[in-house]
């Protein structure tokens, strides 16, 4: 890495907290692994590939984790002076849709839980963020 790019990278890294950098490193490693499985160079993918990655990860991680992954990719591109594929409007629309879908799903789960409790039934699961019923 040339001296100027190294200085820019260090300055960008200094603009975020140590814990954020750790999260970004973990997210970046997930992305790098996914790229390797698909024979792609992590710093030369387009927004379609980022969307495939996020779609793949959305099956097993929370929406907040998807945002960390997205921020991780953006951070690593920007730290190298590159335009991030995450800045594409299609990626933003996908993330907005994923967030809305998640909120809708949680709303359904919470309403089902409330219905079961109100009928004196024992719910099989308690949605995250909802207190367990009193015995």
Image (cartoon, helix red, strand yellow):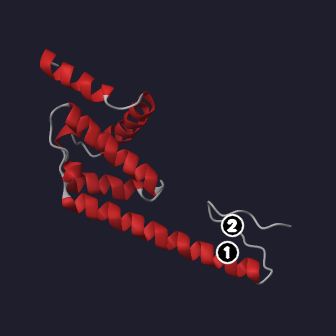
Q: Residue furthest bottom?
A: 119
Residue at the disc numbered 2: 125
Marks 2 and 1 close (CB-CB < 8 Å): yes
Q: Is residue 125 above or below residue 118?
A: above
For marks 2 and 1, give the one nearer the viewer.
1
Of 4 and 52, nearer the camera is: 4
Disc 1 is placed on an element classified as helix
The label on residue 113 is 1
The residue at the point 33 percent across, 44 percent down is: 71
> Quick one: SS at disc 2?
loop
Q: Earlier in the sequence, mark 2 or mark 1?
A: 1
In percent of the image, x 45 and y 32: which residue is there?
A: 19
* 32 with respect to 1 (left or right): right
Q: Is residue 118 above or below residue 97?
A: below
Above or below: residue 95 compared with residue 81: below
The mark found on residue 93 in the picture is none
Residue 47 seen in this snapshot: yes
- Please say whether residue 2 is visible from this viewpoint: no
**Image quadrant occupied by the N terminus:** top left
Quadrant of the rendering where the C terminus is positioned: bottom right
């Amino acid at each position: 890495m040339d001296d100027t790019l190294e200085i820019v990278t260090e300055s960008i890294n200094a603009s975020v907290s140590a814990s954020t950098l750790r999260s970004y490193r973990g997210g970046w490693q997930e992305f790098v692994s996914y790229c390797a499985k698909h024979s792609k160079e992590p710093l030369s993918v387009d927004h379609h590939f980022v969307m495939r990655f996020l779609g793949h990860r959305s099956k097993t991680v929370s929406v907040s984790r998807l945002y960390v992954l997205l921020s991780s990719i953006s951070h690593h591109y920007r730290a190298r002076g590159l335009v991030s594929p995450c800045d594409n409007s299609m990626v933003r629309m996908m993330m907005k849709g994923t967030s809305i879908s998640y909120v809708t799903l949680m709303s359904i789960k919470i309403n089902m839980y409330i219905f079961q409790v109100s009928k004196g039934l024992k719910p099989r699961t308690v949605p995250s963020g909802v207190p367990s019923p009193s015995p």
